[in-house]
Image (cartoon, helix red, strand yellow):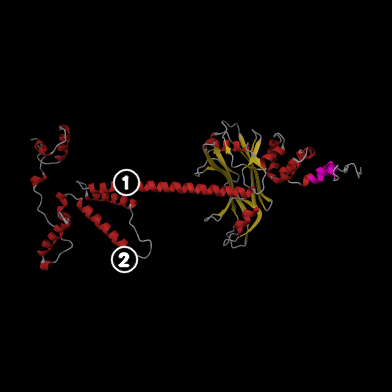
Amino acid sequence: MLSSSSSSTVEQPSRGGSPGINAVSSDVLRSNILTRLDGSSLAALSCTCSNLNSFCSDESLWRQQCSATWPSTLDRRVQSIISTFPDGHRTFFSDSFPFLEHDVVINLPPSCDTSELISAVDIFYKDDVIFSRVHVTETVSGWFLCSPMRVDLVEPKELIPTRVLVTDQCKDDTWKSDLEENLSLSWILIDPTCKRAANVSTRKPVSVHRHWLTGEVHVKFSSIFVVGNKKRSEQVEFTVTVVLAAFNRREEETAVMQIREVSLVAEDKDGRNLGGKVSLEILVAAMGMKRRFRAGGEEEGKEKYIEYMERKTAKVEMKWRRGKETAMETAACWIAVLLLELACCKQRGLAIEAYFGKLTRIWDSMAAYRPLRVCKCGKCECNLGELHEKDCEDDKEHQFLFGLDDNVFRTVRPRSCTSSSHGRCHGGHNRAAGRGRNNVSYANDVQVHEPVSYESSNYVVTDRDTDGVSGFSDSQWKVIKTLLNAGKVNESEN
C-alpha cells in the first residue's frame, strides 16, 4: 500500500484490476469532490453505494447546497425551522428542489392544522441574485381564511433597484427573449407544523408581456394542480407575478431594472380567486405529493401552462357563446313584448309630454334590442341605412298620432291616419285636394271632423248596456261601470 500522508491514503486496487472509490481518501472526497457537486448530482451520488451514502449525508454539505441554491434560506428563522426537519437540510432540499407532480389528483385533507406559512423567495438574473426575501403569512385568522389568497412581498410604494441594465428596445422582442432566458425565480413555501416544503414556481417564466399603458413588464411563473377525485376534478393555478419597471421614460439607451411587485395568487379555471382556506388545504396537500427529478422541467411547466390557458380560453368562449344564444332568445322575447306594448300604448287622458315620454322609452328599448342594420361591406352607394332610418322616424310619427285621444286631437291627424284603408286614403285625399285650386295636393292637408256632441261625450253607462256584454259577474260589472262613468256629468243609476 502506498501512502503519501495520513490524510491522503490510496487503497489497494479492486479485484477487477481498476481502483475503486475506496482508493480515494475520505478527506479528499469530502473537501475536494463532494463540495464541488450540485445538489442533484450529490443526491444521485448518494444512491450508488452505502459508503457514498454515508459521505453524502453530511449535514454541512446539504446546508451549503441549500444556501448556494436559495440565498433566502440563510435567514435565521428559516434555518431554525429547517433544523427541525427529519434529516435537516437534506430533507428540505429533497422537498424544495424537484418539481411537483402536476398530473396527480390532489385529495384535500379533512382538516389543516398549519398556523403559518413561510415564503422563501429568490429571483435570479443570469445566475446573479437580484431579489431575496422571507415572508411569514399567518393562516388562522378570519381575514386570511375568508379572503382571496394573495401574498405580497413588496409594499405598494416600494421600488427595489437592481444592478441589471436593460436596453430599451421597444420595436422588437429582444427584451422579452432576454428575460425568458435569463430570469428565474424560486418561491419555496415552508410549513413549520408538518415540517414539509414545496417550490410552487416553474423557475423559468411561462409568460412575459409588457403592459400597454404603464410600460411595466409582467413576468409570470405558474404551477397548476388538479384538485378533486377521480370522478370529478378541477384545475387550479398558483401564479407568481413579478412586475418590473425596466424601461426608462427618458431618452436613454439603457435603464436600471426595478422590481415593483412580487405576489402569489390562486385562481380556478374560471379566473375566480380562491379563498385562503381552500388555498391552504391545496398547498398542504401538494407538499405531501411525489417529487420528480427530471431534465427539461421548465419547458414542461411552460407547456402545461399553455395547455391550461388554451382550455381556459375555450371554456370562456363556450360560456360566451351560450350567453349570446340565451341573450338572443331573451331579446326576441323582449322584442315581442315591446311590440305588444307599443300596439297598446295610447294617450288615455295623459298629458302630451307624459304620453310622448312613454313612447320614447319603448322606442329606446326597441333600438337597444334591435338596432338599425348598416352596410359592412363598404360597397353600398344607395344610402339604404339613411332611408331605413327615415322610415323608422315616419313609423314613430304615425304611432304617436294613432295613440292620441280621439275626442281631443282628432282634428290634428292627417287624413291618412283616419281613413279605413290605403285605397280610401288616397281617394279621400284626392277629393279633398280637388277642392283647392288646380287640384293641387298639400302635404299638411288635414281632415276636420265635426266636433263631438256634448251628449255623446258625456254618455253614462247603465245596467241596460249589459245586453251586449257577457262573461262578467254583478260585482265585476259594477266596478267596470264605475270606471267608465268616472268624471261623467249627470251620472245616474237607471
Q: Position of residue 417 (x, y in %)?
A: 17, 55
Give the quarter of the figure containing the C terminus. top left
Name the N-terminal-most of marks 1 and 2: 1
Q: Nearer the viewer, residue 269 or 210?
A: 269
Look at 60% across and 31% down and name the residue there. 113
Q: Which mark is residue 382?
A: 2
The magenta segment: 19-33
Q: Main secondary structure of the magenta part?
A: helix
Q: Position of residue 141 (x, y in %)?
A: 56, 34
Q: Position of residue 78 (x, y in %)?
A: 68, 39
Give the quarter of the figure containing the N terminus. top right
330 is within the stretch colored magenta = no
| Mark 1 element type | helix
The amino acid type, in three-letter code, at marker 1 is: Cys
Look at 32% across and 61% down and name the residue there. 385
> Looking at the picture, does residue 207 appear above or below residue 60?
below
Number of numbered discs visible in the structure rendering: 2
Q: Does 100 sit left or right of 270 as displayed?
A: right
Query: Dot 1, how many residues are within 10 Å of its Cα: few (below 14), some (14-19), or many (20+)?
Result: few
The answer to whether residue 216 of the structure is visible from this angle is no
The amino acid type, in three-letter code, at marker 2 is: Cys
Look at 10% across and 42% down and name the residue there. 459
Kindly report the distance in space between the C-alpha atoms of the residues bearing marks 1 and 2.
Answer: 33 Å
Q: Position of residue 211 (x, y in %)?
A: 54, 54
Look at 64% across and 54% down and name the residue there. 181
Q: Which mark is residue 87?
A: none
> Looking at the picture, does residue 491 appear above or below residue 312?
above
Instruction: Single out the residue that lies furthest toward the front.
Output: 16
Q: Nearer the viewer, residue 202 or 17?
A: 17
Q: Which mark is residue 333?
A: 1
Q: Does 321 sit left or right of 27 as displayed?
A: left
